[in-house]
Amino acid sequence: MNRTSDRPYTVMLIVPTGVGAAIGGYAGDALPVARAIAQVADRLITHPNVLNGAQLYWPLPNALYVEGYGLDQFAAGRWGLRPVHQNRVGLVLDAGIEPELRWRHLQAADAARATLGLSLTDYAMTDAPLGVSLQTAASGATWGALQNPDALLRCVEKLVTQAGAEAIAVVARFPDDAGSEALHNYRHGQGVDPLAGAEAVISHLVVRTFQIPCAHAPALSPLPLDPTLSPKSAAEELGHTFLPCVLVGLSRAPQFATHAVAPGQASCPEIWADQVDALVIPATACGGSAVLSLSQTATQIITVADNITRMQTPAAALGLRAIAVQSYLEAVGVLVAHRAGLDPVALRPQMNPLRAIASYPSWQHLGKT
């Protein structure tokens, strides 16, 4: 992609939710990847599944925290991203949360205000329990459903219209299943996050309806101590709530712009899909909406083989042109070369010579019948 010297180099990093990604399928374990890429890029566009680590987070001033549905709309060119200095975050609490657990989340929210200086509106409770249910597909990917989605939307509308919320954090009561094999495997660094798919359903619904940033934190009873816990899952065992990273992410999440600036109008800081220089994605998870949309642009797609998922949609099977690398370390090197305007092949010890094109150029046939 041709770039002028003053154009920011923009990278999108996607690790799909609920597909058992070896990196990014656990409690914020893709955050080191995001930190590394943020050192290479002027702007990093990614999503909560990458940046959320329960009570752990890391400030990345050049990262844009974009919920998955909004990311798809952005990649399709329907929405732009408008960076902000601060959002007032509205907190939705599920009526199904027990009083003690509710207070734990309210105290976490107050701590974020007092310790981190975040701006929150007053909170609102849903007028009926949301009724979250969890499901697992044949592939092992997880998803979920809400028994009362209208209760969620009514609560969000109240926060937006009455409290002036500019972003929404949702805390829903999720089913406890401490003895399940899926949870045991997840806590030991295997299998799929049993909650991720249902979390995506909740945030997608809010973003699609209100077109403002949203992320979700599940409310769960504390789990019994397990001395053999995997480091990849450990961030979720540190306290009573996963809310802090969500509030931090939403506090500076970009707003969505639904109309591009018309020619001749004053310039605006909005970011649109045609400004994305590179996309980094697990090698077997190339079938998502954002990937397919960006494959129709000049964006350079980079696939990472080490990040194994439960999906089976490689770039080649979809006819997508991509640079295949083994690891995220190699992907960072490719990004450095791409930003410098170098063909990564030039950095390898062997290079094939140029070959003649076998067929006639299509322009010779223009106008002929």
Image (spheres, rainbow, N blue to C red):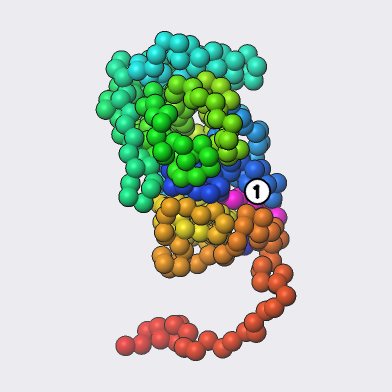
Residue 201 percent across, percent down from the top left? 36, 36
Total numbered badges shown on the rendered structure: 1
Residue at image point 30% right, 25% down = 131
**Going 50% across and 67% down the picture, which residue do you hit?**
321
Q: Nearer the viewer, residue 299 or 304?
A: 304
In the image, is residue 26 above or below residue 121? Answer: below
Picture layout, residue 52 above or below residue 122: below
Q: Position of residue 16 (x, y in %)?
A: 46, 47
Element class at badge 1:
helix
* Relative depth, front residue between 333 and 219: 219
Find residue 125 and report its image quarter.
Answer: top left
Q: Is residue 321 left or right of residue 154?
A: right
- Dot 1 corresponds to which residue? 37
What x and y, as percent, mark residue 349? 72, 75
Name which residue lies at 53% across and 40% down: 188
Q: Is residue 148 magenta?
A: no
Amino acid of disc 1: Ile
Residue 161 seen in this snapshot: no
The reply to whether residue 326 is visible in this rendering is yes
Quarter of the rendering occupied by the N terminus: bottom right
Residue at point 45%, 55% (across, down): 285
Q: Which residues, given as a range, are shown in magenta?
A: 5-12
